[in-house]
């Protein structure tokens, strides 16, 4: 297995996914090792000379005016981790924890944190040997970074706290012992270097961005299936329409739709059945495209953040200087992840309205609720209810977290980002949206069964076949949540997008 080499400069979202989900191992570059050693030498000089530097020879937060002696430096760093381990709630999933550890390691690899090489190597060894600290989801204000959850990560490095190893939750000490990893004893600056940063919010957000990119493609596919089920008008996707309003996402979605629907005998031209379609059919490129543009913007912001130094103070080894700043503040990510949640929620909003058009006989011309034996059977009636409930919940979750702030640390930290809440909300919106699209997938396929599946377009035909391999046509009522879950799994495993791209090439 090829290792992902990290140096704090070139990590990609795709590499985060490889480490998080594919369990790819990690290693430092030679250049990173030299930078780490160089900055550590400067920290050792500060301590030896008893220079007043925040977090190295002083306390933290409001205690920044309390001077710490050379003899107390080690206790200071351990106490920091112990006292800051105040997270609550469910533990983050394994893939998120691995992303958190990777991002923290990559930030430290930049060489501005003053950590010892062997301390960072311990964190990397935990990634490679799959020791996953139990990190509670809640408790971060997003400034000074993700202090509480990152402290839970570091606890295990000290042989404290809890961790998952080979699927079992155990004490941190036991997990490290079973994995054959030596626990560490922190020294000056190291505790602060390990927990003062935005890696929790960014880890959650990076995985959500990755999934949102694929979900946006899937949205075009499900929408195209619905267009065919309802004999939609393709003139609205003509490239000439979109070139005169040249938003990149809008143009790319329009192109996707035409490629997906190529060769279809179910679509129509304007005037054949009706002059124009409702907005959630006619304006798919405008709606989906706006979300795509937002997601791509956020991807750019995340790519900057995952290769940034976000702790405090920063050590500039060449100048032998430490500067206290605010790179730990999560505002750039908080705003981005609020935007991400909104962008994903809109994919669900338009999908649910298309589901309504499919199940409503006054709008579709198809049997009510897509069942031939209406009355005896309810068909897709309550599936639409579930979709409606999910989009309504998304509207609550889409309220921005970043506009809130609660002062902390005796008003020393008087504005915080709430970025971790923003990223967690975006992740929950993604979950809900996936289920709404899963319902549209099976509802559109059911509607197509009342048409003629052999008349589908080049791309939609492959999507329909993949869905029907997993979910059979609904004849008589059955337990629907099984079907919804199967459809959602196809989406989460990207199976529908894969088969479609195999037939018509990569989607935008």
Image (spheres, grey):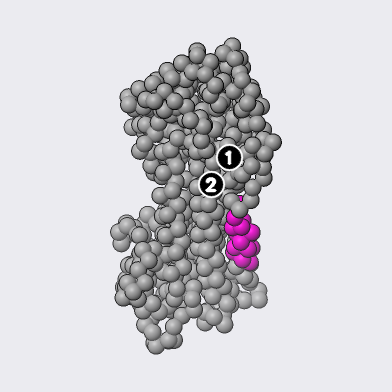
Q: Which mark is residue 326?
A: none
**Residue placed under numbered mark 1 in the picture:** 143
Query: Residue drawn at (38%, 21%), measured in percent from left and top?
Result: 38
Task: Please identify the quadrant where the C terminus is shown.
Answer: bottom left
489 vs 371, nearest the viewer: 489
Instruction: Give the left or right position of residue 403, taking residue 256 as reference.
Output: right
Q: Quadrant of residue 386?
A: bottom right
Is residue 488 at all visible to an observer of this figure?
A: no
Magenta segment's dominant SS is helix
* Vertical placement of residue 103 versus 49, above or below: below
Task: Please identify the quadrant where the N terminus is shown.
Answer: top left
Instruction: Give the left or right position of residue 30, taking residue 193 as reference.
Output: left
At which x and y percent is residue 417? 58, 46
Residue interval drawn in magenta: 385-401
At which x and y percent is residue 353? 55, 71
Query: Residue drawn at (45%, 42%), measured in percent from left and top?
Result: 305
Query: Residue drawn at (39%, 25%), measured in percent from left and top?
Result: 319
Q: Which mark is residue 331?
A: 2
* Vertical placement of residue 102 versus 407, above or below: above
237 vs 415, nearest the viewer: 415
- For label 2, the SS is helix
Is residue 366 at all visible to an observer of this figure?
A: yes
- Mark 1 vs 2, N-terminal side: 1
Marks 1/2: CA distance? 8 Å
Asked if the residue at tag 2 contacts the one at tag 1, i.e. Cβ–Cβ closer than 8 Å, the answer is yes
At which x and y percent is residue 499? 36, 57
Crowdedness of circle 1 by 10 Å Cα count: few (<14), some, many (20+)? many
Is 386 inside the magenta-drawn segment? yes
Crowdedness of circle 2 by 10 Å Cα count: few (<14), some, many (20+)? many
* Vertical placement of residue 202 versus 401, above or below: above
């Amino acid at each position: 297995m090829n290792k992902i080499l990290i140096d704090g400069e070139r990590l990609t979202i795709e590499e985060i996914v490889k480490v998080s989900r594919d369990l790819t191992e990690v290693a430092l570059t030679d250049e990173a090792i030299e930078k780490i050693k160089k900055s550590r030498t400067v920290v050792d000089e500060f301590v030896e000379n008893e220079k007043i530097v925040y977090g190295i020879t002083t306390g933290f937060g409001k205690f920044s005016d309390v001077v710490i002696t050379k003899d107390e430096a080690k206790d200071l760093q351990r106490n920091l981790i112990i006292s800051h381990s105040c997270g609550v709630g469910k533990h983050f999933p394994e893939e998120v924890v691995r992303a958190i550890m990777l991002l923290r390691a990559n930030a430290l690899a930049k060489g501005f944190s003053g950590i010892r090489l062997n301390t960072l190597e311990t964190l990397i060894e935990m990634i490679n040997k799959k020791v996953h600290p139990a990190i509670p989801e809640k408790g971060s204000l997003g400034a000074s970074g993700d202090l509480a959850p990152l402290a839970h990560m570091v606890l295990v490095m000290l042989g404290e706290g809890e961790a998952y190893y080979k699927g079992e939750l155990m004490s941190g000490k036991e997990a490290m012992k079973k994995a054959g990893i030596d626990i560490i004893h922190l020294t000056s600056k190291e505790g602060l270097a390990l927990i003062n940063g935005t890696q929790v919010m960014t880890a959650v957000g990076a995985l959500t961005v990755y999934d949102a990119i694929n979900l946006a493609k899937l949205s075009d596919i499900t929408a195209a299936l619905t267009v065919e089920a309802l004999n939609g008008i393709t003139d609205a996707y003509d490239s000439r329409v979109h070139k005169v309003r040249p938003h990149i996402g809008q143009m790319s979605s329009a192109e996707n739709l035409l490629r997906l629907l190529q060769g279809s005998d179910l679509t129509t031209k304007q005037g054949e059945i009706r002059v124009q379609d409702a907005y959630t059919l006619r304006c798919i490129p405008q709606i989906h495209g706006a979300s795509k543009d937002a997601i791509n913007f956020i991807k750019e912001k995340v790519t900057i953040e995952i290769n940034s130094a976000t702790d405090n103070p920063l050590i500039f080894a060449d100048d032998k200087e430490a500067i206290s700043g605010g790179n730990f503040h999560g505002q750039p990510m908080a705003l981005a992840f609020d935007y991400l949640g909104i962008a994903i929620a809109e994919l669900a909003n338009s999908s649910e309205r298309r589901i309504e058009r499919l199940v409503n006989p006054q709008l579709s011309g198809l049997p009510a609720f897509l069942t031939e034996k209406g009355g005896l059977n309810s068909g897709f009636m309550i599936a639409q209810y579930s979709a409606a409930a999910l989009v309504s919940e998304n509207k609550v979750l889409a309220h921005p977290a970043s506009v809130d702030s609660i002062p902390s640390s005796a008003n020393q930290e008087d504005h915080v980002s709430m970025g971790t809440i923003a990223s967690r909300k975006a992740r929950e919106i993604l979950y809900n949206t996936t289920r709404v699209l899963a319902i549209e997938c099976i509802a559109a396929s059911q509607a197509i069964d009342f048409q003629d599946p052999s008349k589908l377009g080049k791309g939609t035909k492959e999507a329909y076949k993949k869905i029907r391999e997993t979910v059979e046509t609904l004849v008589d009522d059955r337990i629907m949540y099984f079907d919804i879950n199967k459809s959602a799994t196809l989406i989460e495993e990207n199976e529908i997008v894969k088969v479609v791209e195999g037939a018509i090439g990569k989607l935008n």
